[in-house]
Image (cartoon, rainbow, N blue to C red):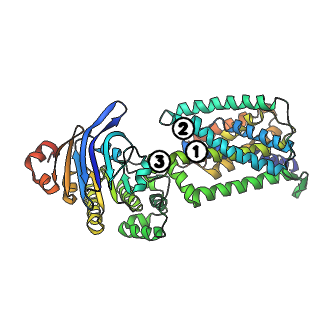
Amino acid sequence: MSLLELDEVVGGYGQVQVLHGIDLAVDEGNVAVVLGANGAGKTTTLRAISGQVHVTGDIRFAGTSIVGKSPEAVSQLGIAHVPQGRGTFGELTVEENLRVGAINRRDNDIQRDLDRWYGVFPRLGERRTQEAGSMSGGEQQMLALARAMMARPRLLLLDEPSLGLAPLVTRELFARLGDLNRNEGLSILVVEQNANLALDIGHWGYVLETGNIAVEGPAEQLHDDEAVRKAYLGF
Amino acid sequence: MQLFIEQVLNGIGNGVVYGSVALALVLIFRTTGVLNFAQGEMALFSTYISWKLTETGLPVVGAIVISMLIAFVAGGVLQFTLIRPMEGRSQLNVVIVTLGLFLAINSLAQLFFGTDPQLMPSAFPSGGVDLFGGARIQKDTIGLIVVLLVECLALWVLLNKTKLGLKLRAVAADPVSARLHGIRAGWMLMFGWALAAMIGALAGSLVAAERTGFDATLMQIILVYALAAAALGGFDSIWGAVICGLIVGIADALTIQYVDALDGIEVVVPLGLILVVLIVSPNGLFGKRTVERV
């Protein structure tokens, strides 16, 4: 049984159907990568998982169906969703942003986790009392990742983390994601345009095309498949 | 000089009330992004409830506390039944609903409590205290100032030092992102309305006691001054709303005393202040410049 399983998921916004039957799975401890052009349904797929889109079909997390659950409820089950645009609470300080990540935790390790993420991302530590909205895009992406991790999720959903970031910052970000997966066994579902970097840390890859899974396979294989690269990935 | 000081104190007495209502406006604006035009009338209705309770023989403070609790529940219910269904629609819709509420609550207050002026007893001791230079300050003015300071402090602690406050501010900053972090945004918005209604109930009940009789028009002019205070304060700062309430109150009192040309039309003072401040500094005196990066 996979940690996350999507079965024939159909859904969209109002009358507009975006997803036409998505089958997808993320195994515990794995990184799954969803690639595809703009408008293929990548963001909608993530929103369907976190309860922001009305869907039919089945979505199971750790064996239990989560279809019809609110975003709040899905979050409390252990799924952290970093949306496109990073979801920064601009008027809150960096530290308050991180505390929002841990808002539903009841244990006493919150301070220790804060220190830990300040250690991983020293920039956040330097700016802990600064308003988060005043930080650069790269810093906000680091903040979004750390904030999501403050919830100690079992599954991390990332929507185009590289969007608007300098290549060097993107590389750094994916290195951190790879670390998290390898060292802590964090399961990740990442949607990306930057196929190279994402497939490098991924175990399994999917290529979405107009709301359907066009191709899937081991990340390495997708990365090296000439035909797939030419047709879908554009490199 | 004595006259000047007394007028300033007068202004502070009124300004405290403007600041208090501005506080309620800012609280709702910060958590939901809309101006609640019915804020004053909600406070009026609560004031009538306080008054009615004192008529039954309850002590004033007890009556006001009960009325505040009722307002807290009613504020939440109003948000749940009338504002929440507007979720996802244009904010203009919500503003129109609050305008409708303004009229509806005012009419209901007249229907239930009549149109005759009523006397609200004061929660504070009567009489004055002598100050330097021969000026006197009324004890209930001191009481109002103390109550407002305590209220601000409590709100500030709630918003900045508690988990609940952090949730409220997170929802205000980005409701979608807040929900993705497991915060029930709907509950928080309801709580914001409940809190604002409670603050309004307190302000209304205290100001009504300052008057030699109040009727259903009590809060209307106060709302105009409170809007001026909130706008001056930049609509997102608690302390800004209060300090600007005082500024508006003092400016108003001094105008009445010293500017004969504006006799009877002093209300242009707060409006003029809004105009000038917003031209010079569009974020108000205390508003934060919104910084957004993509």
Rendering coords of residue B202 (x, y %)? 74, 47
Q: Which of B187 and A168 is in front in this view?
A: B187
- Kindly indicate whether the residue at mark 3 contacts the one at mark 1 (C-beta within 8 angstroms): no
- Give the numbered dot on residue A80: none
| Chain ID, mark 2 | B
| Pointer 3 and pointer 2 on the same chain | yes
Q: Nearer the viewer, residue A67 or A71?
A: A67
The residue at the point 72 percent across, 47 percent down is: B68
**Residue A147 at x, y = what percent?**
41, 59
Please report the residue visible at 82 percent of the width from the left and 36 percent of the height from the top.
Answer: B214
Is A212 displayed left or right of B167 in the figure? left
Q: Is disc 1 surrounded by few (<14), some (14 to 19) or many (20+) residues within 10 Å?
A: many
Q: Mark 1 points at which residue?
A: B190
Q: Give the structural element (helix, strand or loop) at label 2.
A: helix
Q: Residue type at mark 1?
A: Met
Spatial CA span between label 1 and label 2: 8 Å
Q: What residue type is labelled 3?
A: Asp
Please give the residue where the numbered disc 2 appears in the rendered image: B84
Q: From the top left corner, tell me how far across and down residue B163 is, in percent.
A: 55, 59
Q: Name the residue under label 3.
A: B174
The quarter of the picture where residue A231 lies is top left
Question: What's the chain of the residue with tag 3?
Answer: B
Residue at 52% of width from left, 45% of height from top?
Answer: B186
Q: Taking B100 as reference, is B52 above or below it?
A: below
Mark 1 or mark 3, which is nearer to you? 1
Q: Answer yes or no: do the residues labelled 3 and 2 have beta carbons within 8 Å?
A: no
